[in-house]
Amino acid sequence: MKNQLIDEIDNLLPQTQCGLCTYGACRPYAEAIATSGEAINKCPPGGVTGLLALAQLLQQDPSAYLEEMQQKAKQPSVAIIREDECIGCTKCIQACPVDAILGSAKKMHTILTDQCTGCELCIPPCPVDCIDLNHLEPLDAASQKEKANQWRLQYQKHNKRLAAKSNEVQSPPTQSRDSRKSEILDAILRAKSKKGSQDESPQTL
């Protein structure tokens, strides 16, 4: 029964995998609600609609949370890379929980907007601040449900890929930290030069 409840709660969450609930992803938050009585007001992407749905499922009174959720509800969005400024450091790719970013080291990256959850996890690690967030109009209930199911599958595939990678018996030689750091600093300098900011100091990693 507990697993069924976790599934039902998880199905009401938006599956952005943003970690704003402090649980890292949607499923762990669902588990915390079901097993530990965690509060139902910790999902800004779910907004008031998500709050009310959770309250109905769990037979809780949401009134104490409504005003707070109205203020902190997060508008749907997608991340966009200003590709001319991208230095190909791959930090955003490593941060994306749903593999919605394409690119390789020293090559321009791009975001697959149809797969992006708007989690914003790619923004903080970008050393040249070339990622913007574009806000979207809210989807209707059916479209949002379809999107959530898509993002859940992407997240599961992402985790399987990481698990398979960690279980590989032999891995290719990894680049040294100092060498990688030097390359990123050089790339930052080139990016700043393009923008006419040669007098600025390179950012520290």
Image: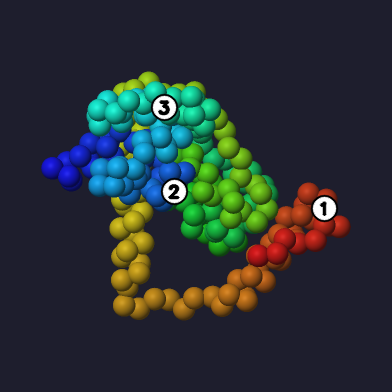
Q: Nearer the viewer, residue 97 or 89?
A: 97
Tell me if mark 3 has few (under 14), some (14-19) or many (20+) residues whose alpha carbon lies within 10 angstroms of its own. few
The answer, for residue 30, to whether it is visible in the render is no
Residue under label 2: 22
Image location (x, y in percent) of residue 190: 74, 59
Image location (x, y in percent) of residue 72: 52, 32
Tags 2 and 1 touching, CB below 8 Å? no
Residue under label 3: 64
Local SS, label 2: loop
Tell me if mark 1 has few (under 14), some (14-19) or many (20+) residues whose alpha carbon lies within 10 angstroms of its own. few
Q: CA distance from mark 3 to mark 1?
A: 50 Å
Give whichever of discs 3 and 1 has the lower sequence position. Answer: 3
Q: Residue at x 35, y 78 (%)?
A: 170
Disc marking residue 75: none
Q: CA distance from mark 2 to mark 3?
A: 20 Å
Position of residue 174 in the picture relative to residue 58 (left or right): right
| Quarter holding residue 167 | bottom left
Residue under label 1: 197
Tell me if mark 2 has few (under 14), some (14-19) or many (20+) residues whose alpha carbon lies within 10 angstroms of its own. few
Q: Nearer the viewer, residue 25 or 36?
A: 36
